Every structure is written in structure tokens, then in C-alpha cells.
Image: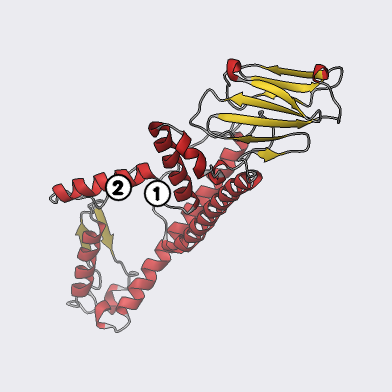
Amino acid sequence: MAIISDYQDDQPQESQPQNAPSSTSTFTAVLDRSSPLGFLNSVFDFLSKESDLFKSDSAVRDITSVAREVKEREEAEERKKKRLKEGDSSKTAAVPKTVAPAKTVVPPKEEGMKAQVNVKEEKDEKEKETVTEEGKTHEQGSKRAPNKGNGLDLDKYSWTQSLQEVTVNVPVPAGTKSRFIACEIKKNHLKVGLKGQPPIIDGELFQPVKVDDCFWSLEDQKAVSILLTKHNQMEWWKCLVKGDPEIDTQKVEPENSKLSDLDPETRQTVEKMMFDQRQKSMGLPTSDEVQKQEILKKFMAEHPEMDFSRAKIA
């Protein structure tokens, strides 16, 4: 129950006419907290009947000014409480805790500040995305373009490859005899060099090989040629041994003349890989992605009653 009463200072009784109307009125109304505007409406109705407030041209402006002053005092009090609360939290908190941000009603004056904060957060997110994209670009830039044999030429050796085999060429001093060569081929490891000297190659192979189908030979007493038969003959190697520079397998270009030597199933797989590599290099969908799109279009045509506007295809 809220009661608003207006009073005037007591005047001597003899100065007022005996039958003069009273200058004070009593207002009684119940405040419903869920509908404070209803209470204000009752107040304004009372004022319009009992006073000349609304006969003035500046009535609306004066009421708005009073309401603004009350709101500003309330906002100032809230900000003061918030600062005190943050100060207490920073002093007493021993271990930082992650607290989900509460949804609060932002006063009009603070909306501008909040918008600036949101703009800054969006800018930070864009910068993070830019850094991520730059990292991907740098990672791709660190990979080298393959040589004509779809391998790589390094300081101490070079290698080429097909889908089935890897050929390694290791230069040695002219006149070297085969008995001075130390070559050890294992399923996942390759070690090559001259006896009594540090190995030229010594590391884990990029992929396993079929040891029984691998061999080495000395070419013209000046280079060791090693043939490695891949265990997985459907994948291009990025490097010979792990830790060495890698090639960009999307730039691998197998010779078309060798496709005729493959069986139909293998040839179809190779051609599909080549097509997908070209599509990726141009930013276009691969064969699998094209097939999925065609299936989706067919399904949409068969079911026009369904809404696919928000569908996301992985």
C-alpha cells in the first residue's frame, strides 16, 4: 500500500475564510510491482483532477525531467555497487574461476560502451581467424613442389616415385666398389652409406615397404640406386624418411603413359586421384563431393514438400 499526501504549512486559522476549500488532497492507491505503469497512470489521473499540472505547456517536459533524474540516480547507484563488488572480488579471490557471464539489462547510457566492447571482440576474433589462415598458408608454403619424378632433390640424395615404387639415388665418390656400400632396408627403416663412415640416409620411412621386393645396386661406381616397393600402392609419399622436407602431393603429376600399364581397377583409382587433386587445386569439389551434391539434388526433386533451406551438408 502506497499513500501520497500533500501538505502545506499551517496558517493561522483566522487568516482563512471559514468556508474556503482545502488546499490538500489525499491520494490512496495500491502498487502492483508487476505493473508499475498502472500505478503511475493512477497518479497522473489524480493530479489532472486535483491540480493544474497538466494545464501547463511544459507539463510533459517537467515530468520527463523528473523521471530522468530518478533514473540517473538509480544508474549511478548501480554502478557504485558494481565497482565495490568487483573490488571485493579481486581482493578475496585466491584462485581464478571461470564464471558464465550473467545476462543483465544494460542501461541506455551503457549500451554504447557495450557496443564498443562487442566490436572489439569481433575484431579480436577476426584477427585470430586471420592468424589461423596465415598459419595454414605458412604450412602449405613449407611444402616443396615435387621434381619431375614426383619426388624431391635434396643435398645428399634424390628420390622419385610412382604409386607402386620409390626410387632413391645416393651419390658416392667415383670409383666406389659395391663392397664398400652399406645398405640396410627394413619394413619401416632405411639406412644407406659407406662402411666406416656416418650413414647418408638413416631414418624411418614415410610408409612401410615390401622388403622382399626391394633391392639396391651401384650405378657406374658413382651412385647407389635403391628401389623400394610400397606396401600401400594407392598413396603418394610426402617424403622418403620422416623428418625430411615434404612435397605437396596435390602437385604430383603421374605420367599418362604409365596408366596403360595398370589394371583397370588401379587405373580408375589413379585417374580419380588425379581428378580430385586438380579439383582441389582449383578450389572445386572432388568427385565424392560432386556425387553427394547430385544425390541431394535428386532427393530434393523427389520431395518438394520438404524444406531444405537450412540443411547443412557435411
| x then y, percent, for residue 309 | 25, 53
**Does residue 312 appear in the picture of this structure?**
no
Q: Are marks 2 and 1 in contact (CB under 8 Å)?
A: yes
Residue 144 sits above or below residue 202 on the image: below
Secondary structure at numbered mark 1: loop
The residue identified by callout 1 is 285
Q: Amino acid at mark 1?
A: Pro
Query: Between 87 and 16, which is closer to the camera in this rendering?
Result: 87
- Depth check, front residue: 202 or 304: 202
Question: Outermost residue toward the front?
Answer: 220
Q: Pointer 2: what residue?
A: 293
**Going 22% across and 52% down the picture, which residue do you hit?**
32
How dense is the environment of label 2, judged by Cα within 10 Å: few (below 14), some, or many (20 and up)?
some
Q: Residue 45 sits in which quadrant?
A: bottom left
Viewer-proximal residue, 247 or 141? 247
**Secondary structure beneath disc 2?**
helix
Residue 80 badge:
none
Q: Is residue 224 left or right of residue 265?
A: right
Q: Residue at x 74, y 38 (%)?
A: 154
Q: Which kind of residue does numbered mark 2 sit on?
A: Gln
Going by the picture, which residue comes out furthest to the left?
Answer: 305
Placement of the C terminus among the 4 image quadrants: top left
Residue 145 visible in image: yes
* Percent coordinates x, y for residue 16 in the rendering: 26, 78
Q: Position of residue 250 (x, y in %)?
A: 53, 44
Tell me: 208 left or right of 192.
left
Left or right: residue 85 versus residue 48 is: right
- Whole-number angstrom distance, CA of label 2 to CA of label 1: 9 Å
